Structure formats: structure tokens, C-alpha cells
Amino acid sequence: MEKILKGVVRFHETVTEEVRPMFARLVKEGQSPRALFITCADSRIVPNQITTTDPGDLFLLRNIGNLVPPYSVVSAGQAGSSVAAAVEYALEYLKIPNIIVCGHSDCGAMNAVRNFKKLPEGSHLRTWLSYAEQALSRLLEGKVLDDTLSTQNQLAQLNVLQQIAHLREYPIVQQKLQEGKVDLYAMFLDILNAEVQIYHPGRNRFVRVDPPVVEELAYLRRVFASVPGVRMNLPDTEAFQLQIGHSNGVQAVVEENRKAAVSGNKK
Ligand SMILES: [Zn+2]
């Protein structure tokens, strides 16, 4: 505790003056976050650090395993409504335009999910981690995104996509997607390499966020925005194929752009 309290003292002594104008503006204008950022409670993830963002930029929701209970479970009263309330508040009242689910490497929750059967029956942990069970099934079926990763990290990546799929079951998310008012993204923090990756729907894998990837994703977002009913809500390959399946043109354009971006980088 000593370290934390001394840190607070240091904040008061050295940082307060720097941040006071920013805080004053945030109080006067209210918050207008750029994203609802759903991530694991793991202490090694510092969302503002890995995105180099400021107070007011990220509306944070953290829990063990960055999970979003399926809407059927929430609406049946079988899961706490904390996540659902945060999603509702973020989209309905704060009008946040992006939702990011961010998983990470070396996640203890994913290890527990792998050993799910060993968790005590009826424990809160077991109930909570059951929301990642479908990702575990996909792992066991071999539907992994990157087989060079450890099993734990493969599961962590599948889990992020699974939680995005859960999010899409929420009526408020469906509504905002249809209105074109929200985009969904899947991220993955590789702690060992201090590398942040994002799910790239055109490549069906997580890729390091670098300038060409940022450009590609911006391009994809424009392409998707121009196709009725299709948004950047695609971190689920099957749904992705399904959604753009009606327009071969989009797939071709995406692929063309990807190649152009790649060859552009080499120049
Ligand atoms: Zn974790």
C-alpha cells in the first residue's frame, strides 16, 4: 500500500498541475470517449499506456478474461447485468462510436478455462469463465488463428472473437450496428513483446498495429460503410464471410487494396 500512497503524493506534487486544464475541460464539456474498451483485469494491461491515450478517451470495462456474458444468459437473469449496463450506457448515453475487446497473452483466466473441469462446481469463477467455453470448443476443434502461438494464447485470441460475437447478440449493439453508429474491434496485447495486435478481417488473424495496418483498416471501414447493412463489426470470420458474401465486389476490392498496401510498403 505504501507504494500506492506515495504514488498518490507524487501525483499531487508533480502531475496535478499538468493535468488540471485537461480535467477542467473534461468536467466542463463532459466525457466523450472514443471507445468502450473491454479488457481483462490483469494488472499488466494499462489501456491508456498501450494506446497512448489520455483521460477521457477510453471508457473502461474490466473483468476476469475480458468476457461479455451471452445476452440470453443476461436477459434470463442468470448473469450479472454489469456488462450489459455498461454497454447500454456507453452506446445509448455516451454515444461511443467504437467498442474494443482486448485480450492478452499469458492470461490466467485462459489457463483456468483450459482446466475448466477442475474448477469447483458452483463457484463464481466457474460460472463466469463458462462464457469462454465456446472459444475453448473452437480451440479443441483446431480452429485456431495462429498455430505458432502457445495453446493458452491461441485460446486468448479465439476468446476475444467469441466475446465480440456475444456483444453482437445485445439488442442495443445490433441497433447501433444497423444505424452505422458503432464499429467493433478485437485487440490482443502480446505482453512479452510489448506489442498490440488487432484482428484484421481481410487476413483472418491478429496483426501488429503499424501504419499500413491502420490505413488498411480505415479503408476497410469506408468500404464496409458504403455497403448497406455491413459495418466494421466483423471479428468473426464466419459472420464476415456471410456478411460480405452477397457482394463479391467488396471482397475483390478489399483484396486489391491489401495487395496495393503491401506493395506500397515495399517501395
Ligand atoms: Zn487476463
Image (cartoon, grey):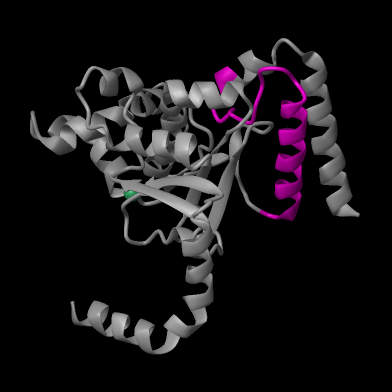
Q: Kindly give the residue lying farthest to the front in the view shown.
A: 28
Please state which of residues 141 and 255 is positioned toward the viewer in this rendering: 255
Which residues fall within the magenta stretch?
Answer: 210-239
Q: Dividing the picture into quarters, in which one does residue 181 lie?
A: top right
Residue at 47 percent of width and 34 percent of height: 92
Q: Where is residue 222 in the image (x, y as percent from the top left)?
A: 76, 34
The C terminus lies in quadrant: bottom right
Determine the image quadrant of residue 180. top right
Q: Is residue 172 left or right of residue 211?
A: left
* Residue 55 is inside the magenta segment: no
Q: Foreground: 255 or 75?
A: 75
Tally of numbered discs = 0
Counting from the top left corner in percent of width and height, residue 134 is at 35, 23
**Residue 206 against residue 170 in the figure, above or below:** below
Q: Is residue 193 visible?
A: no
Residue at 32%, 42% (x, y): give it: 65
Taking depth in this image into account, of 238 and 128 the one nearest to the observer is 128
Q: Residue furthest right?
A: 267
Residue 45 position in % (x across, y down): 40, 58
User: Could you tell me what secondary structure mostly forms the magenta stretch?
Assistant: helix
Residue 160 placement: quadrant: top left
Whether residue 141 is situated above or below residue 90 in the rendered picture = above
Task: Give the residue displayed 76% in from the left and 47% down from the top.
Answer: 215
Residue 245 spot, x, y in % from top left = 69, 12
Q: Does the magenta stretch include residue 223?
A: yes
> Could you tell me if residue 250 is visible in this image?
yes
The quarter of the picture where the N terminus appears is: bottom left
Q: Residue lying furthest bottom in this view?
A: 13
Q: Residue at x 30, y 80 (%)?
A: 8
